[in-house]
Amino acid sequence: MAGEHGPIEQPRPGAAKSIVYMISSFALRLVQFVLVVVLGLVGIATTVIWVGIPILLLTTSMVRGFGNLERRWVRKMLGTPLPPADRAPVEGGVLRRWRMRLVDGTTWRDLAYLLVAFPLSVVEFVIGLASIVLVPMAIWVAPWIGWVHGSLAVALLGPNRAERLRVKAQQLQASRARGVDAAEAERRRIERDLHDGAQQRLVAVAMNLGRAKNKLDREPEAVRALIEEAHTDAKLAVSELRDLARGIYPAVLGDRGLDAALSALAAKTPIPVEVTVDIEPRPPAAVETTAYFIVGETLTNVAKHSGATEAQVKAWRTDDKVIIEITDNGHGGAEVRPGGGLAGLADRAATIDGVMTVVSPQGGPTVVRADLPCTW
């Protein structure tokens, strides 16, 4: 449904599909245009004698049906990610349902598309035939025409602005909820690490020092052993606290930026990892932290579960976002499962309105990509 989709971007279709689309669509558009225009005019002209009402009822249904057909056709041939029309449910009698369809903006946008698409299809048909013969037109003109038509379909057949704003609000609400859950999970992890690690070490230090105090005068050799044990525990506690602090926010990330931090992660990975970073200017701290932990967790999963012998990490910046890609040559099959590690990384990206995708066919390779906005 449209309500489940965000803003739509039109990809650039291939030359072959664009040519086939432009040629094969002409007959379909001709039939649609003739039926809609002729039946619509006849229905309007004969409304005064009641004959026009069933004709207009049929025309309205045809417009909606043709609109749904065009969404599927454009989606298949041009790769436009158009969702099915999100039409409000209609109840009641025949005339009531017709009246509700007439006030539905989607119906009128479907009609506008059908009326505009036919004259365009005439031009596209000629260009499609010429592209079969002329190679330059097939390579450069046909894909551009396909992109223009896909953009028109997005404008008229896609969700309207109010729908996009509603979807955006839903996404932000879901992102906020995931952010709260992620923060709570992180708080519990820190609490558990403190309780099971550094806190136990410090308790042991205190106990050993207490025992050493009691034996200070009577057993000096035993006191020495207790102090040495307490000293060892204290050093371990400091190390564990340092690791915990590094897990919250690594010092190298704050001091030297994402390039040095990702290189340090790659150096700790047991398989060779090639790192390419081109991020200037430096993004906000929240983006750097999110990117760092996504790469770190992904490389850990690669080393443990993928069977890969090498991996690549690429990070670059566009005008408004940082993009991270981690690729490995493992056996593939990775999925974003509820409650799994990849789902947790997706939730972490969502806290700053980012999007993470995983492409991992059986046999590999696996590509994990995160698009992290620098403004939100």
Image (tube, rainbow, N blue to C red):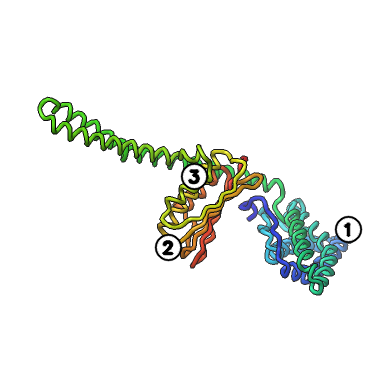
Q: Nearer the viewer, mark 3 or mark 2?
A: 3
The reply to whether residue 355 is in sight is: no
Q: Quadrant of residue 235?
A: top left
Quadrant where the N terminus is found in the figure = bottom right
Q: Secondary structure at mark 3?
A: helix
Q: Quadrant of residue 283?
A: top right
Q: Residues within 10 Å of mark 3 (few under 14, many from 20)?
A: many
Q: Residues within 10 Å of mark 1 (few under 14, many from 20)?
A: few
Circle nearer the N terminus (2, 1): 1
Q: Residues within 10 Å of mark 2 (few under 14, many from 20)?
A: some
Measuring 46% from the left and 40% from the top, which residue is drawn there? 250
Whether residue 357 sits left or right of residue 184 in the image: it is right
Instruction: Look at mark 2 in the image and give the residue it sits on.
Output: 307
Q: Position of residue 8 (x, y in %)?
A: 68, 53
Q: Position of residue 276 (x, y in %)?
A: 55, 52
Q: Position of residue 28 (x, y in %)?
A: 78, 69
Q: Amino acid at mark 3?
A: Ala
Most extreme residue toward the top is 217
Q: Amino acid at mark 1?
A: Val
Instruction: Look at mark 3 in the image and give the residue it sits on.
Output: 261
* CA distance for labels 3 and 2: 24 Å
Q: Secondary structure at mark 1?
A: helix
The reply to whether residue 278 is in sight is: yes
Observer-nearest of 36 and 176: 176
* CA distance for labels 2 and 1: 75 Å
Whether residue 285 sits left or right of residue 319 in the image: it is left
The disc label shown at residue 48, or none: 1
Observer-nearest of 256 and 363: 256
